[in-house]
Amino acid sequence: AMVGTISLYDGQGERQHTTYIAAAPERGRDTFLFRMQREVEQVKRLYPQAHYQGLGDGAAENWKFLEPLTHSQVLDFYHAAGYLGKVAKALHPRRVEYQQAWMDTHCHILKHEVGAATRLLTEMEAIEPKRLSQSVFSGLTDAITYFRNHHHQMHYAEAVARHLPIGSGVTEAACKVIVKARLCGAGMKWKERGAEIALSLRSLTYTQGRWQQFWSKINRYGFTLAESLH
């Protein structure tokens, strides 16, 4: 299944509202992306002066969708930080305590220093690979590739200074609450239509005010509209 969120934050970085969008699996994600884009455009009509930031993991299709709709794009900090663990192993392959110390220091640097991602990439590329085991070298290579592909989306210090979010925890939590808690119970089996209806209703109930809006339209237009909302 697919889940997206649109969150509104105040000037101090406190989340004020979240709209949840969920859909059953589909080839190409066209229906889900159409609904996401419709929701984003509605929010932008309500708040035309706001800054819109796209936030996600490293999947290329996420950025293809988000870039035209947002002013800035930020890679989830915790995905990026996870790759620093691979670098720490390459630098200190036999000293776990050194690995943790390096991780703590450089996660802080990545989060709070302007240009940190580019400097970290340079440091990774300078590591001598000859003394590394195959698995550690493979991890280092993965980290270098990840930072090469996404360092332009790792402007965490600037985002933090503007009180903008740098983690996709809201969406990841929605995956658990909206989808897994409802569809993945013991012995459950779903047809696509049933899953789609369940996820649509669950998204309505978890988005503040949407359930009331839904029933207001039902009362006004009848159940034909309800069928078109799925």
Image (cartoon, rainbow, N blue to C red):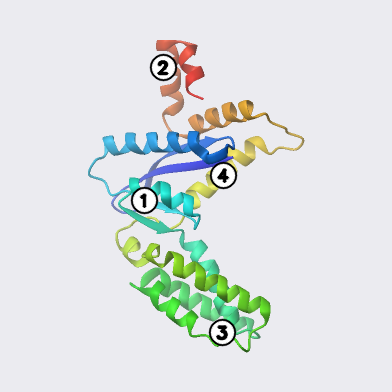
Q: Amino acid at mark 1?
A: Glu
**Residue ID for mark 1:** 67
Which quadrant of the rendered structure holds the N terminus? top right
Gap in angstroms between the C-alphas marked 4 and 2: 27 Å
Q: Amino acid at mark 4?
A: Cys
Query: Residue 36's x, y, as percent?
Result: 43, 38
Residue most extreme to the left: 49
Q: Amino acid at mark 2?
A: Lys
Pointer 4 with pointer 1, Cβ within 8 A:
no
**Residue ID for mark 4:** 175
Quadrant in which residue 161 is drawn: bottom left
**Residue ID for mark 2:** 217
Q: Amino acid at mark 3?
A: Leu
**Residue ID for mark 3:** 91
Residue most extreme to the front: 28
Q: Secondary structure at mark 4?
A: helix
Quadrant in which residue 2 is drawn: top right
Quadrant in which residue 217 is drawn: top left
Q: Earlier in the sequence, mark 2 or mark 3?
A: 3
Q: Earlier in the sequence, mark 4 or mark 1?
A: 1
